[in-house]
């Protein structure tokens, strides 16, 4: 008979960590006497980050006496006390390889249902002073598990734990955890996991994506505190950079020119998916080479790529390209990459952009027109006025080739007044977009300034489009995912403080920073943080893949081997360092 040994609670508090402040409820301590367990929580307990802990699906965390004993021996520790693993219930019995998702247990006056293994999170390592703890919990198959409250009631140390119902499929907590975080997954076990209604929605979504990943290759999101970014590596092509020749340059507007590129020996170019981009490497003056990314702006042909570049007033690279680039010049180019791509299917399509953001969705429009796609297509574009409306004639011609194409243009300048019935003055509004009659099952692809994408995304959601079908692209640094870290002032990326490193150059392409590697850094993630580059992570030990980053060029080594390697063309920056000059899509 299993027994509840300790009830542990603790309210969130601020904890200093690596020069930052983490708001966390990981500090739990035993309490005496009965405690009321309600639908969302144990009385007196709280979580600092409800995105990954707490709430109805994760009302209480369970960890076992036997695992405490295991870690005491494995870590050589004699100071582990109940609550240190962040658990609410310390139990004698209920091992992770025996308890199954969907099992129900009665403890005292309450009944509970097992919903998922513990989320891999750096904060358990923070609490224990063992940075690798998140990885160890998974690798040693001792994660612990969360409970949902079926019947509210009081519990206290000494209560017996009684199994009241066995979960369907009898998939253990340890097997469920390994199914998500470890390689060599069993397809039959994935199907079993998806047949368990009690499994938390986040883990169900992860397993659906893993099931899909066994068809067309893709990187699934991992269950946890935040959705993980898609694999940003190249699908095919060449490693690193290679020279392509400029065949012609075509002005599109006073500020935008299209650059056509071909191989130097006439060999075919690798196919690219519509929406992908090229990274270019350019030396400006005596500084280290600079890397910038530009979308392919037409359907890639076998012998030509086209990118379209806007001359920015303070853009070092764009001004250099507009001022000095000539046909016949060579440019260092990395192979097409990116996952903001047009998906196959039958649902209606919305292609929306502002300014130079038209380029990736224009490539999608080229592809749709080339095959006379029968899906309804809406082309929405915002520009300052007709003279700044790049690709206007080109898009009109492409839309004319579609059986069901629609166009809506917005000119933001106050004069002159547009006369075309498909052109409006101002910016997209809720009423003007609703009037377009876009079906709620459409897939939308948005590219442009962040404010444009945020505003139009909100409008489309209000029109009924599902959030997961609204895709956005941006070439600046992605928004940070730093769970639990309290908000800090936004700082422009910069060179790291302290002595200049003597190792290979590391370029963070999205952030425009190139700096030398220093052996004083623990990882590429540590270097990025020292440069105040927005980063994405959760476990910081190579488990959750939140930090997966496109590897444009160069080689790395893993200082701590991840439990599962990322796909080719990507790297886990939380546990790696460079061995050669490196360019990261970060």
Image: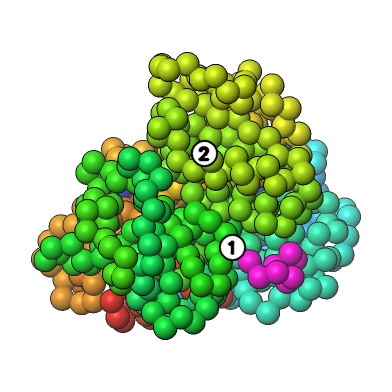
Secondary structure category for the residue under label 2: helix
Q: Position of residue 383 (x, y in %)?
A: 45, 32
The secondary structure making up most of the magenta span is loop
Residue 500 at what x, y percent from top left? 13, 67
Query: Are the residues tagged 2 and 1 within 8 Å (C-beta)?
Result: no
User: Dot 1: within a 10 Å radius of its alpha carbon, few (fewer than 14), some, or many (20 or more) residues?
Assistant: many
In which quadrant of the rendered image does the C terminus lie? bottom left
Was residue 213 drawn as part of the magenta stretch in this picture?
A: yes
Residue 498 included in the magenta stretch of the image? no
Residue in view at x 40 percent, y 34 percent: 388
What is the secondary structure assignment of the residue under circle 1? Answer: loop
- Give the residues in magenta: 211-218
Quarter of the image where the N terminus is located: bottom right
In the rendered image, which residue does mark 1 sit on? Answer: 273
How far across and down, in percent of the image, does residue 217 sit?
66, 70
Residue 581: horizontal and vertical position, in percent? Answer: 28, 76
Tell me, for residue 53, which label it has, or none: none
Q: Name which residue lies at 20% across and 77% down.
A: 503
Residue 327 sits in quarter: bottom left
Q: Which residue is mark 2?
A: 392
């Amino acid at each position: 008979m299993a027994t509840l040994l300790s009830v542990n609670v603790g309210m969130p508090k601020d904890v200093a960590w690596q020069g930052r402040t983490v708001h966390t409820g990981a500090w739990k301590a035993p309490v005496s006497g009965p405690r009321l367990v309600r639908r969302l929580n144990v009385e007196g307990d709280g979580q600092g980050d409800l995105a990954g802990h707490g709430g109805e699906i994760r009302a209480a965390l369970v960890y076992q006496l036997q695992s405490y004993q295991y870690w005491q021996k494995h870590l050589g520790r004699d100071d582990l006390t109940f609550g240190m693993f962040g658990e609410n219930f310390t139990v004698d019995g209920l091992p992770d390889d025996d308890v199954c998702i969907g099992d129900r247990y009665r403890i005292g006056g309450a009944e509970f249902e097992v919903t998922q293994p513990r989320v891999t999170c750096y904060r358990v390592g923070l609490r224990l002073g063992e940075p690798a703890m998140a990885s160890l919990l998974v690798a040693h198959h001792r994660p612990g598990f969360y409970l949902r409250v079926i019947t509210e009631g009081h519990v206290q140390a000494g209560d017996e734990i009684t199994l009241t119902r066995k979960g369907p499929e009898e998939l253990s907590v340890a097997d469920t955890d390994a199914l998500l975080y470890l390689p060599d997954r069993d397809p039959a076990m994935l199907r079993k996991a998806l047949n368990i209604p009690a499994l938390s929605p986040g883990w169900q979504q992860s397993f659906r994506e893993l099931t899909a990943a066994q068809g067309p290759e893709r990187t699934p999101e991992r269950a946890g505190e935040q959705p993980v970014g898609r694999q940003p590596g190249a699908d095919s092509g060449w490693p690193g950079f290679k020279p392509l020749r400029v065949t012609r340059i075509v002005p599109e507007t006073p500020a935008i020119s299209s650059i056509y590129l071909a191989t130097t020996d006439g060999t075919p170019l690798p196919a690219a998916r519509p929406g992908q981009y090229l990274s270019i490497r350019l030396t400006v003056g005596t500084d280290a080479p600079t890397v910038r990314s530009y979308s392919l702006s037409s359907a890639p042909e076998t012998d030509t790529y086209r990118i379209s570049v806007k001359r920015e007033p303070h853009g070092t690279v764009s001004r250099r390209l507009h001022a000095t680039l000539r046909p016949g010049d060579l440019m260092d180019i990395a192979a097409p990459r990116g996952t903001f791509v047009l998906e196959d299917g039958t649902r209606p399509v919305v292609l929306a952009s502002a300014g130079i953001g038209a380029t990736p969705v224009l490539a999608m429009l080229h592809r749709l027109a080339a095959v006379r796609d029968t899906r309804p297509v809406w082309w929405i574009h915002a520009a300052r006025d007709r003279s700044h409306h790049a690709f206007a004639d080109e898009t009109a011609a492409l839309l004319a080739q579609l059986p069901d194409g629609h166009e809506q243009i917005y000119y933001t300048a106050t004069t002159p007044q547009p006369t075309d019935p498909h052109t409006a003055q101002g910016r997209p509004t809720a009423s003007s977009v609703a009037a377009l009659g876009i079906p709620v099952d459409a897939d939308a692809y948005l590219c442009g300034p962040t404010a444009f994408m945020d505003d139009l995304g909100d409008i489309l959601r209000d029109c009924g489009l599902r959030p997961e079908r609204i895709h956005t692209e941006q070439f600046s640094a992605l928004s940070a995912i730093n769970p639990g870290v309290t908000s800090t002032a936004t700082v422009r990326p910069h060179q790291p403080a302290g002595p200049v490193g003597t190792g290979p150059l590391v370029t963070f392409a999205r952030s425009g920073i190139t700096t030398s590697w220093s052996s004083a850094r623990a990882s590429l993630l540590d270097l990025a943080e020292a440069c105040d580059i927005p980063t994405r992570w959760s476990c910081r030990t190579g488990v959750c893949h939140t930090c997966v980053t496109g590897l444009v060029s160069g080689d790395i080594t893993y200082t701590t081997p991840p439990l599962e390697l990322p796909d080719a063309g990507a790297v886990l920056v939380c546990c790696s360092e460079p061995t050669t000059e490196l360019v990261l899509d970060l």
